[in-house]
Amino acid sequence: MTDSVPVKAAKTSFEIIHALRELEGAGVSELADELDKPTSTIHDHLRTLESEEYLVKSDGKYYVGTRFLGIGEQARARQKVYRVARQEVDELADETGGHTNLMIEEHGRGIFLHKSRAPDAVQLDTHAGMRVPLQTTAMGKAILAFRPREEVESIIDRHGLPRVTEKTITDRGELFDELAAIADRGHAYDDEERVKGMRCVAAPITNEDGRAIAAISVSSPKSRLRGEEFREEVPDLILSKANIIEVNLTYS
Amino acid sequence: MTDSVPVKAAKTSFEIIHALRELEGAGVSELADELDKPTSTIHDHLRTLESEEYLVKSDGKYYVGTRFLGIGEQARARQKVYRVARQEVDELADETGGHTNLMIEEHGRGIFLHKSRAPDAVQLDTHAGMRVPLQTTAMGKAILAFRPREEVESIIDRHGLPRVTEKTITDRGELFDELAAIADRGHAYDDEERVKGMRCVAAPITNEDGRAIAAISVSSPKSRLRGEEFREEVPDLILSKANIIEVNLTYS
DNA sequence: CCTTTCATCCGGCTATGACGGATAGCGTTC
DNA sequence: GAACGCTATCCGTCATAGCCGGATGAAAGG
């Protein structure tokens, strides 16, 4: 216990919730094993969380309850950019036939706030609320490219540059070069840096000061997104959508 | 502190989160005031939750973070009925031009799992994750009507029959009469029992044993939903959709 | 510039949460 | 059908950690 938070019990409760998510539901001893704590301690927490209706118990196993849904939904709805961009992102999916996403930064991580999928697009592992290292996605890089350097540095200090696929950027210098190119160009690419076989184009959503507050993207399998389309058409489309969102953010 | 849970600190943390939701973000002393606890205690919890990335601090105020979004999303996605019914509920909105919803029961409360809104439908206060007393909605009543009586009794014992509008059912006997009628008819109505001016038609989703595991509904302003449509057409439509969902639940 | 308000920090007291062990309940196996 | 093994639940103890009052620092407001 090196990193000391004032209320350890709260931390433990959330560790349990997190473990329940990963295990997709679990029993007491399974959790005790996973978290390396006595069953009685785990049981105490589970009982508390269940009686507060944050967990549900079904056939001897505990699961995360839907009470978190309302909390998360509210956290999302407060983001002005979500309310404004949502519809545009949906439209973008229809227009491009791929996946489109909206991402913000929180605690130095990339958060998928919304995703839209055209009817014939492939299945993907992304979901609303998903947290990823910023430099592993086109959206994340687009956000970083429009943030002050010292802020980017401090984010890297905090989270490092974890490798996800063999193409992930893991070198500080390389990342800053890439960010400079993105700032210059105005949009970002991701060529299999997070998911193999997938390509992605992203544009930042900036405020009046030029600071990125979010990003939107289109992603498709490599085979569907190439040449002119990858380099010209889709970027233009995204940039114009990003621009619309920016304008709507200002006047509303 | 009459109701004793084993881990009081966890409960307090969640009380803070809940208060933050209601206040839509707050400072330390505001929360201390609201929850009637010393600022130092509140501060301890806030610090913990913030460092665990469940809250965000912005300009001196604390807000619920988007980390809950992923948790809630996963809790929802685990519900098979959600995965199956989602699309049908969306279609139903297009077909009827109103609001359509999917509700499940959890801890004796009604949980809105999904809602869909036709482009020209009115704005409503419902949102995914919202928790309501079961007897105040058509969906909730549809669920109760297809649950064993003793289960309904124990839910009422736990949560009572809180009044929401002047038309809310608050009498036990009256409720059971209504439930009997619903069980007989196969679908439920709500005529301004939760929101003034709104009407609602709901049908249960039952499993092989005839036990309700969820319900779907269509709601519209009173002026738009009346006569034949309210009594015949919409119910038929909903029932057929419910039936499709039930079949898909069995074979998938 | 002074006042007020609020967040943050600090240190002590004691309630309380972590824990080990005992018990009960359930399913499984022979 | 009985005995075994597993897991959830309960209980009592002890040391800790969470709660709190008060002090400090920072920022806003008059």
Image: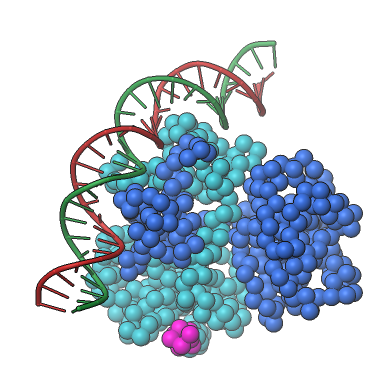
Chain colours: A blue, B cyan, C green, D red
Tell me the quarter of the picture where residue C25 sits.
bottom left
Q: Is residue B252 above or below residue A227?
A: below
Q: Which residues are magenta?
A: B244-252
Q: Residue at x 47, y 76 (%)?
A: B80
Looking at the image, is B139 positioned above or below residue A136? Answer: below
Count of numbered tags: 0
Residue at 33 percent across and 53 percent down: it is A39
Judged left or right of residue B187, residue B155 is left
Magenta stretch, overall SS: helix
Tell me residue B230's x, y (percent).
48, 82
User: Which image quadrant for residue A72?
Assistant: bottom right
Task: Determine if the magenta segment contains residue B245.
Answer: yes
Q: Position of residue A143 (x, y in %)?
A: 76, 53
Nearer-the-camera pick, A180 or B121: A180
Q: Nearer the viewer, residue A106 or A246?
A: A106
- Position of residue B104 in the picture relative to residue A140 (left or right): left
Q: Position of residue B250 (x, y in %)?
A: 43, 86
Is B118 drawn above or below residue B18 in the view shown? below
Relative placement, left or right, of B76 versus B160 is right
State which quarter of the image contains the N terminus of chain B.
top left
Residue at 31%, 76% in the rendered image: B147
Q: Nearer the viewer, residue B117 or A1?
A: A1
Residue B124, visible in the rendered structure? yes
Q: Residue B203 colored magenta? A: no
Residue at the image point whose x is 38% and y is 50% from the top: A37
Task: Identify whether A31 is placed above or below B110.
Answer: above
Q: Nearer the viewer, residue A65 or D1?
A: D1
Residue B52: % across, % down: 54, 46
Q: Is residue A87 in view from this perspective?
A: no
Q: Quadrant of residue B168?
A: bottom left
